[in-house]
Image (cartoon, rainbow, N blue to C red):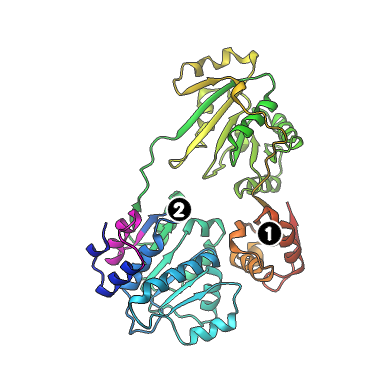
Amino acid sequence: MNFSKLPLSKEMLQTIDSLGYKNMTPVQAESLPLILEGKDVIAEAKTGSGKTAAFGIGLLQNLDVKKFRVQALVLCPTRELADQVAKELRRLARFQHNIKILMLTGGESFGKQLGSLAHQAHIIVGTPGRVLKHLSKESLELSNLKTLVFDEADRMLDMGFIEEIKSVLSFVPKERQTLLFSATYDDEILDISKKFQKNALHVKTTQKEGENKIQQEFYETNNKVETLIKIFATYKPKNIIVFTNTKLEAKELAESLVQNKIDALAIHGDLEQYERNDVLVQFANKSCPVLVATDVAARGLDIKELSMVVNYDLPHTLETYTHRIGRTGRAGAEGIAITLYDSREIEKIEPYEERQECHFLDTSILKNMQGFDMKPEYVTLVIEGGKKDKIRAGDILGALTGDTGLKGSSIGKIDLYDKQSYVAIENGLIDEAHKKLKNGKIKNKKFSIWIL
């Protein structure tokens, strides 16, 4: 776990020691030897795990300082992260004089960046949209690139940067080292790795996934809405899917929850496709904490991190029960599955009573909080323009962070469709973002903007 065990220069080791890095973190210990060998690596690494030093030490050690050309490119989802990464790389680069690290992000003067690029750089740290703009205008040249890094790749996918990333890749040499760091390790990330990396070696320092850890609780009640709100007040889950057996009940329950200050949306078979899109986008981007759904409507719905599942109605079969509750507690996280039943359904719950993992509890243990409400973390802004208007996620991010002055960290998931785009904005900033974007332009064009 000691950096001295790695094939690093004496100067680099002195710099690492001066920064107070005594021992490697798990992600550094597993990925750095591979990175130094020039291998492609896909690593699961959360914020604070030491991932920047992992790829930073690797690309700096492999740098030819005498060759004043761009040899490494680090792509980040937001300019705030790019700024953090650039600062960390500059601290690590102290071991060698004349290493030039340049940041290319939206919200900064393009002309000033042009001037800096005219004098070349060894390492570029930037956001996909701005890097692509420089590549398109030929102010950035990557023929000497050795290492390409995707930092927080899952966040880049969430923000809709896949098209920009593909375009950037058309400018980089085929023979290169590609490093991909992501907080999640799902099929989407693995698919990106297959497309962009060669024989990538996997680094996953968290425990291997076991069976879903799901706390299964059953409550008998003759007032399901009241009990449901008490469950929310007790557990304070971030996002919940509540299952009903009929379309009408889904609609009525969502309306009832809204009347009780619980932000909820229903999804069922009677919705038009655009209405379904609106609902699913809001739930997936954290603009609505509660989704009330029928089994049919929930098919194909993939939410990576779901805190809780509630069976408002008893499922018709054990198989349906297993399928419903299996949506929570994924990827090693813990989940909660609650099932409600009334006195008329006693016989129907007998199969569950035989299961050791099912716990039957009294509603008296639930909290009854006066004035409890559930409001979303984000609110969704809709832009009447999408892929067919050649709008990219970077264009939207640039308009929000540049013209309106929003921080990238205040912007959540960006979803691009053919004719519409959805952007999650921090709840308290939605009115300001809406006003400024409505009066501003995206790619020098005016678009209709509204709040969902």
Q: Is residue 329 covered in magenta? A: no
Q: State which tag comes first along the sequence, 1 or 2.
A: 2
Number of dots carrying numbers:
2
Report helix, strand or loop for mark 1: loop
1 vs 2, front mark: 2
Q: Quadrant of the N terminus?
A: bottom left
The residue pinned by badge 1 equals: 419
Query: To which residue does mark 2 refer?
Result: 183
Marking on residue 163: none
Seen at 72% across and 30% down, the residue is 248
In the displayed structure, 325 sits above or below 314; it is: below
1 and 2 marks in contact (CB < 8 Å): no
Residue drawn 54% across and 43% down? 302
| Residue 38 drawn at (x, y percent) | 29, 67
Residue type at tag 2 = Ala
The quadrant in which residue 169 appears is bottom left
The boundaries of the magenta stretch are 19-41
Left or right: residue 74 versus residue 219 is left
Q: Quadrant of residue 45?
A: bottom left
Report x, y in % for residue 217.
53, 25
- The amino acid sitting under disc 1 is Lys
- Given residues 230 and 452, the one toward you in this image is 230
Q: Position of residue 29 (x, y in %)?
A: 30, 57
Residue 33 colored magenta? Answer: yes
Q: Which residue is more in the foreground, 172 or 157?
A: 157
Q: Element type at marker 2?
A: loop
- Dot 1: few (<14), some (14–19), or many (≥20) neighbours within 10 Å? some
